[in-house]
Amino acid sequence: MLLNVKRLLAEEGLRLPFDYTLQVPQSEFYGDDDRLASLHIVGEAVNRAQIAELHFAVSGRVETVCDRCLDPISRAFEYRYTHTLVKESPNGPDEDIIVDGDAVHLDQVAITDLRLDFPLKFLCREDCKGLCPLCGANLNQGDCGCDKRQIDPRLEALKELLQ
Ligand SMILES: [Zn+2]
Ligand SMILES: [Zn+2]
């Protein structure tokens, strides 16, 4: 969606609300296992005392797998952002968006913001026990009975020397 910044800056007190759904190309920022049908973007741009501010929330649901045990995960998320739209800002704060021309491409702003905050990995739960490295069993469903004590190869060599 294009946000008309020229119009926004021309009228003090003007509010431009928006509420729309954005289809995100799979390749934009998700791994092969992740699925994200759409993003819901809701917010407004306001001219507050001749300063153009942009406030919005990005929400959606990601379908992925647990990084440790590979169980499917379906998780809702929501992130909120605020920016100031400026014509030029050589030393402005990071939240500033420099407007080149008369419009801002809101989709790109939202995707760029989300990319910085979106987790690279998801866990089915904080204390997920993962898979057994020996038999591949899901250890959240109980112990598989494998002997998972790691044998240090240096100790093995020492043991042989002592024999
Ligand atoms: Zn897990
Ligand atoms: Zn096992």
Image: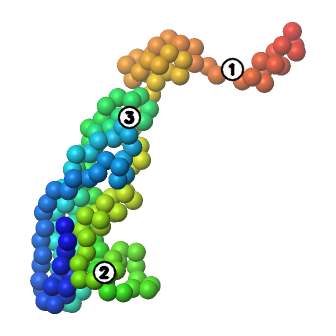
Relative height, residue 109 to residue 133 (above, below): below
Q: Give the amino acid at mark 2.
A: Val
Instruction: Report if the beta carbon of the residue with label 1 is closer than 8 angstroms to ligand 2.
Output: no
Q: Give the amino acid at mark 3.
A: Cys
In this rendering, does residue 76 appear at all? no
Relative height, residue 102 to residue 141 (above, below): below
Task: Give the structural element (helix, strand or loop) at label 1.
Answer: loop
Q: How many marks?
A: 3
Picture disc at residue 99 = 2
Q: Are marks 1 and 2 in contact (CB under 8 Å)?
A: no
Kindly identify the residue that appears in the image at 42 percent across and 36 percent down. Answer: 67
The residue beneath circle 3 is 66
Q: Are marks 3 and 2 in contact (CB under 8 Å)?
A: no
Q: Residues within 10 Å of mark 2 (few under 14, many from 20)?
A: some
Task: Give the structural element (helix, strand or loop) at label 2.
Answer: loop
Residue 80 image point, x, y percent: 26, 62
- On screen, residue 90 versus residue 104, left or right, reads right
Q: Nearer the viewer, mark 1 or mark 3?
A: 3
Picture disc at residue 129 = none
Kindly identify the residue that appears in the image at 41 percent across and 21 percent down. Answer: 138
Depth check, front residue: 106 or 95 = 106
Measured Cα–Cα span from mark 3 to mark 2: 39 Å
Q: Are marks 1 and 3 in contact (CB under 8 Å)?
A: no
Measured Cα–Cα span from mark 1 to mark 2: 60 Å
Locate residue 155: give its quadrant.
top right
Instruction: Report if the beta carbon of the residue with label 3 is closer than 8 angstroms to ligand 1.
Output: yes
- On screen, residue 70 versus residue 74, left or right, reads right
Q: Which residue sits furthest top?
A: 163
Depth check, front residue: 55 or 29 = 29
